[in-house]
Image (tube, rainbow, N blue to C red):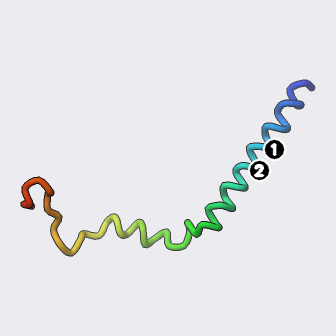
Amino acid sequence: MNVLVVLIPVSLILGLSGLIGFLWTIRTRQYEDPLGEASRILLEADTPRTTRATGKE
């Protein structure tokens, strides 16, 4: 019974922090374009990248 005194507040705190984190991600619009960011990694750039030190490809 003494364990419940600790586990119930801890579970409530963890649940509320998860809910607050989820609401924060919705408010900052992190779910707006999930496919756009994923496909941007796979697409090649139009211009070739050059190194800064030599200026060559």
Instruction: Check residue 50 in the rendering and tell me which mark sits there, or answer none.
Output: none
State the image quarter where residue 24 is shown. Answer: bottom right
Outermost residue toward the top in this view: 2
Are dots 2 and 1 in contact, CB under 8 Å?
yes
Q: Circle 2 sits in a helix, a strand or a loop, which is it?
A: helix
Q: Does residue 43 appear to the left or right of 35 in the view shown?
A: left
Residue drawn at point x = 86 percent, y = 26 percent:
3
The N terminus sits in image quarter: top right
Outermost residue toward the bottom in this view: 46
Instruction: Check residue 16 in the rendering and tell me which mark sits there, or answer none.
Output: 2
Q: How many discs mark residues in the rendered view?
A: 2
Q: Residues within 10 Å of mark 1 (few under 14, many from 20)?
A: few
Up the image or down, 12 lies above or below 55; here it is above
Q: Amino acid at mark 2?
A: Leu
Residue drawn at point x = 71 percent, y = 55 percent:
20
**Residue 57 in the image, given as x and y percentages of width and height:** 9, 61
**Residue 9 in the image, given as x and y percentages of width and height:** 84, 38
Outermost residue toward the right in this view: 1
**Residue 49 in the image, given as x and y percentages of width and height:** 17, 64
Residue drawn at point x = 79 percent, y = 37 percent:
10
The residue under label 1 is: 12
